[in-house]
Amino acid sequence: MKKNQKDKVTLLTLGCAKNVVDSENLIGQLKANGFQVVDNLKDASVCIVNTCGFIKPAVEENLSVVLELVNLKLSGKIQKLIVSGCMVQRFDKELKEEFPEVDLFVGVEKQAEIIRYLKGNDDDLKNQLLGERYLLTPKHYAYLKISEGCNRECSFCAIPNIRGKLHSRPIENIVQEAVNLANRGVKELILISQDTSAYGVDLYGKVKLIDLLEELTKIDGIRWIRLMYLYPAGLPDELFDFVADNEKICNYFDIPLQHISDKVLKLMRRGTTEKYIRNLIEKIRVRNPEAIIRSTFIVGFPNEDEKDFANLLDFVEKFELDRIGVFTYYQEDGTSAFPLGDPVPEDEKIRRRNVLMELQKEISWKKNKEKIGSDLLVLVDQKQGKTFLGRTEFDAPEVDNLVYISPQNSSIRVGDFIKVKIKRAKEYDLFGEALKV
Ligand code: SF4
């Protein structure tokens, strides 16, 4: 082993679940190549920070983390600092100028370059070992990245510039990874990508999402499969039937709608209309009344006026989507909406977001209260004191609701599926007692 392979490496992951998977693969590769990976910065000689560069606030937050790490390096607390990921992909030149103290900047999916740098630049890529992906999530669930990049042209979005065009992983690779994860105790797979609706089109000439799901549902040990990021335009009816008919696929539709007004949707280049979206939601609800729908919206997009916003409020009120996230618009360099400017004042954007979130809070509370008295299947994620915290099939980790479980003398373990009698509800969370199964 070379001297520098005694380096103790720590990795900080900022941003979304896709970044988490990149970090998990990198940790596997670091371990396979002889590096000791440690949890704490104070025990490390090398720090790698995997960044997010999606929107301005994320970039600002990530820059402050890099600055703190640079200070740690200058004070001698760490010897090497590596900055990787989306922010580097997007602002490589600027970052190199701003932070000459950083030893290495690498963009997305460049794990091999990091290993080569740490092993010594003379080392050949061929000599690198791939290693088993390390899970940063609790070991009963894992994200499964099915593709990278995106071919859509949403005018507000910088992701295609950062992550490139859609490139799907072959079905057999994904299935192989899913089997490995199941063998390691994973019970829930969370499929992620930039555009899950388009899976396979680049590789097979047509969308192959259902083919992929058919293979994944055959895997022993996997009980839940959750789909994230279904782009709404062109979603096929067969998918709604497939989800409704298949026990392992969570009755959970994560469909980022972004707006409802035709004028704004057109400016956003979403390829959808108000009529299409209303039909889509109705169709899902008719075919699968049990399913919940999660969505995200952007408020304060250029030229969104009071009428457009009122229309969005009316839609959310009438359709009562189960979960929503609301973001204020950020004018991003390099996007096609950039020339539209940023005419809606910041405080007005925040007001619109707050009004929408207040409305959603009422909807969510009403829906949660309807669950009191019911018995729900819950996957236990963690323990806090004497209370266990879990999720139903209607909730993804990190972004959705929790179920707080009083154990009632039963022997519950993290990672168990249990039945819970719901006793109490708050706006976003449920409270219940574990039932004997
Ligand atoms: S679908 Fe649109 S918003 Fe999503 S990553 Fe692609 S371009 Fe961006």
Image (cartoon, rainbow, N blue to C red):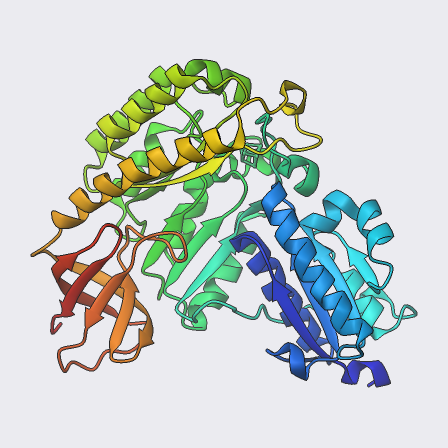
Along the horizontal axis of the image, is 30 left or right of 252?
Answer: right
The total number of labels drawn is 0
- Find residue 177 and report its horizontal and vertical position in percent: 52, 61
Q: From the image, which quarter does the C terminus lie in?
A: bottom left
- Find residue 265 and report its horizontal and vertical position in percent: 47, 20
- Find residue 358 and report its horizontal and vertical position in percent: 30, 39
Quadrant of the image where one finds ligand 1: top right
Q: From the image, which quarter does the N terminus lie in?
A: bottom right
Q: Nearer the viewer, residue 167 or 108?
A: 108
Q: Nearer the viewer, residue 131 or 255?
A: 255
- Find residue 19 and report its horizontal and vertical position in percent: 59, 55
Residue at point 69% right, 36% down?
Answer: 161
Q: Nearer the viewer, residue 23 or 324?
A: 324
Q: Is residue 352 something one can see in this rendering? A: yes
Q: Is residue 111 something one can see in this rendering? A: no
Q: Is residue 371 above or below residue 302?
A: below
Residue at point 54% right, 52% down?
Answer: 16
Image quadrant where residue 338 sits: top right
Along the horizontal axis of the image, is 402 left or right of 111?
Answer: left
Residue at point 57% right, 59% down?
Answer: 21
Residue at point 57% right, 45% down?
Answer: 147
Q: Is residue 125 above or below residue 78?
A: above
